[in-house]
Amino acid sequence: MVEKSINYPGIFDEIAAKLPGIANHGQVASYIPELANVDPDKFGMHLINYQGEHFSLGASDEKFSIQSIAKVLALTLAYSAEEETLWQRVGVEPSGNPFNSLVQLEYEQGIPRNPFINAGALLVSDILVSHLKAPKEDLLAFTRKLCGREDIHFNAKVAESEKRTSYNNAALINLMKSYGNIKNDIDVVLDFYFNLCSIEMTCRELAQSFAFLANYGVNPLNNEQVVSASKAKRINAIMQLCGFYDEAGEFSFKVGLPGKSGVGGGVIAVYPGKFSIALWSPKLNSKGNSYKAIEVLEFLTTKTQLSIF
Ligand code: GLN
């Protein structure tokens, strides 16, 4: 077998040339009113390879709302805190349902299918509220360390906007509480969850924050073991199977990398041992995932054969 050498500058130039011709279908998320204010034509992309080289395109240094991508950061913290008992309260199976769906909770006694649907991330948030002294501050400190930058913040307007329209998430957490799977005060957990989703980052910061998952659990910035290699493998496996909800199969089929999306239009993907990449394009397809980010990532992994498959 031969290992392929990769010409990253070449492929970035090719994508830059193709970009204007790639369709930008879909709609910016508006169910969280504050998210509707973003320019729908923004596009950014940033890749960091295992040698620590950076490649970027477009608005890669502009902050955006990372939304559900932050669920991976929360899971990483909760997995470290709870170890394997975590899986007694949340599963690792793809849901095949929309990210905000309620139906499976009833059949499965309040145990969410996986940590990346909203129910699962609310459950993970409950675990963090139990474990962390100052949950919101600790989460920010963890994220800042991952990407080596201090200017990582919640967006209070986005968190507030989500709180005001939180009927679906409130229903999910109440249902889990009724089954005894939520231990803390519902409003405290929801407040943590809305702040988690409101974190803002650039593509560069996001790619850097996820580099530990491309590096067997070690943060390449400071060589600290964030999680064990085994935990990194498992988190990547959950991203592969559940990161795009009821589009996870199609994302695997087209792109072939572990990844996670957010309704702010962000997408992160990692190739263990090779690179992490973040993309941002706010218009979402009907499954709530960025239309153009997936198109571009599919082009990249097909052209370079840089898919884990
Ligand atoms: N904050 C969003 C919500 O709870 C996150 C959803 C997402 O990014 N898919 O609905």
Image: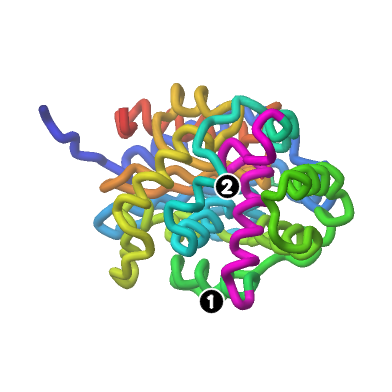
Q: Residues within 10 Å of mark 2 (few under 14, many from 20)?
A: some
Q: Amino acid at mark 2?
A: Arg
Residue 286 location in percent, x, y?
70, 27
Residue 254 location in percent, x, y?
45, 24
Q: Look at 56% across and 58% down and name the residue there.
A: 74
Q: Is residue 47 left or right of residue 97?
A: left
Q: Is residue 278 above or below residue 304?
A: below
Residue 129 location in percent, x, y?
65, 66
Q: Is residue 146 left or right of residue 282?
A: left
Numbered disc 2: secondary structure: loop
Query: Depth check: 128 or 259 in front?
Result: 128
Q: Is residue 75 above or below residue 225?
A: above
Q: Amino acid at mark 1?
A: Glu
Magenta region: which residues?
A: 107-134
* Quadrant (top left/top right/bottom left/bottom right) for the C terminus: top left
Q: Is residue 54 visible?
A: yes
Q: Is residue 222 magenta?
A: no
Q: Is residue 43 visible?
A: no
Numbered disc 1: secondary structure: loop
Q: CA distance from mark 1 to mark 2?
A: 33 Å
Task: Residue 150: give its label.
Answer: 1
Task: Residue 89: give its label.
Answer: 2
Q: Look at 76% across and 65% down and name the residue there.
A: 188
Q: Is residue 71 above or below residue 159?
A: above
| Among numbered discs 1 and 2, the one appearing first in the sequence | 2
